[in-house]
Amino acid sequence: MSGRKTIQVDEAQWRRVQRKARQLQGLQRNVPRLLDDVRAQTRADVDRAFATVDARQRRQDEAVRQLSDRTRHIEAETGRRLREQAERLHQEMHETAGRIEEQTRQRLDGLRREAERALAAERAERRAETARLAQEIDAVKADRARAEETAQTWLADARTMAGLIERELPHERYAPGRLDRLVQRLATAGRNAAEHRFDAALALGQETFHELSDLRVDIEQRELARCLARKEAVEALVQVEALADENRRRPVVDPDGTPVAGYSLDVAHWSGGEYDQVRQDTAAALTRARDPQTGTDALLALRDEEAPALERRLGETVERAGLRQLTSQLRVNLADVVAQTLAEVAFYDLVEEECHYAGEDERGDFHAVLRHEATGNEIRVRIAQAHPDSDQCVIHVETTDHDVTAEAELRDRADAVYQALRQEGGPMGLEPSAPVEETVLPAPASVRGSRDEAAGTTT
């Protein structure tokens, strides 16, 4: 015939389905299993990080033993403090693994503040030592041989400390260019000594050594703070990864929210790749969190921004997957209403073997075929969403006649479908509008006789 008929259906049911699907966004949390998984992975990561810290501090201890008697005791004590601090932090982080809560963070922040106080105390001690040693300079000046020996000792200790920092510590990450400037000052002090200006060499050598020692402590403190930020970032991201595993399959619920026995929601399938993308992005973020080159600020951003964003995306993905599965069933329900109506008003029977989803994929359009036993005429019904995740479904009804069907009869069929959607759509919450004509292009002459009707319904 000359046109299509459409029925607009209010999206009340869609909103109702959305409310049910939105409940899925509250991600399943099997707390004991989830915490066990997060705890195990976090502890393993913490242990790996502090194995590196421990090995680095042992190498520093070996370098400190090469210092002179004058500085070895001070630096050994500093190393002991750093080791003790790292061990306490390691133990605390190991014990609190899996406790993703504000109280835990406050305890770890307390350790960090304690470390800052230790750093301040260490620097105060060094300033006092520098002042005491400065008083010796005038006495040393009177003894040329002693002056040369003392200056060379301080220069050698400073070079040992510079080498330790160069080899063992990420100085360019935390103090870019500072070591180079101190090494240049050492070179100046060395030239002073070569020119027998031992008083100048001694003063500059002492000052440079203490600044190098401060730099060592400062870098170690910053690196421990980075270890803490890494632990928190990894922990937050591992939780997202564990939640993704926990929510890979969810119980299937009907439109009333009742779980359907024997069925589950395959989130990866129904999300159309969104779930896999969240998993990939989480894995990439974890790789960055575990990368020793990732800085503290970047780790805090992973903890405070990226991990929460990934968890929100996961929840939204689970919600959309559930919504898509529910609307897939809704398309079948709509096709059933249309089929029952046409069976009653026009005596068409459903051809069950020809009812299917496009491409055998339940995420696609649903197709149904009805056939009139006496005439052989067929009605093909296709239920599709207007566009992905749309709040409208479009019901396409196409009749293939071997005889001629009057326009009035086609109109009556559309009216009957409209009435059925109003009456039987109650359980689905449907409120359709009256049918309206839609203009379509005429079929070619060779097939026009066999395509007399194309009536459509939109929900």
Image (tube, rainbow, N blue to C red):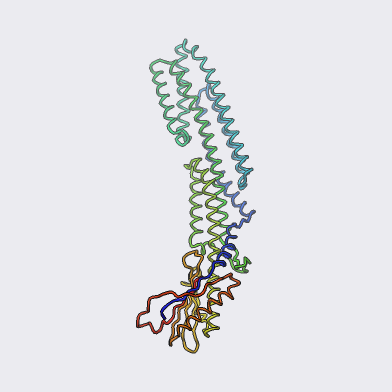
Classify residue 438 by image quadrant.
bottom left
Identify the residue shown where x is 44% and y is 80%.
Answer: 453
Q: Is residue 40 above or below residue 13?
A: above
Looking at the figure, which quarter contains the N terminus?
bottom left
Q: Nearer the viewer, residue 423 or 131?
A: 423
Tally the marks.
0
Q: Residue furthest left?
A: 445
- In this view, 447 is above or below 213: below
Across and down, in percent, residue 33 comes to: 62, 54
The answer to whether one can see residue 168 in this image is no
Left/right placement of residue 39 relative to residue 135 reads right
Q: Is residue 385 above or below residue 137?
A: below
In the rendered image, residue 383, in percent from the top left (x then y), is placed at 49, 73
Left or right, 362 with reference to 90 = left
Residue 447 sits above or below residue 11 on the image: below
Q: Residue 196: x percent and y percent? A: 40, 15
Q: Residue at x 59, y 37 (%)?
A: 87
Q: Using the image as rendered, state which of residue 122 and residue 379 is in the foreground.
A: 379
Q: Position of residue 335 (x, y in %)?
A: 53, 75
Q: Name the one closer to the observer, 237 or 384.
A: 384
Residue 172 in view of the camera: yes
Q: Residue furthest top?
A: 142
Q: Residue at x 49, y 62 (%)?
A: 272
In-image side of 205 versus 90 (left or right): left
Classify residue 104 by image quadrant.
top right
Task: Report whether 113 appears left or right of 152.
Answer: right
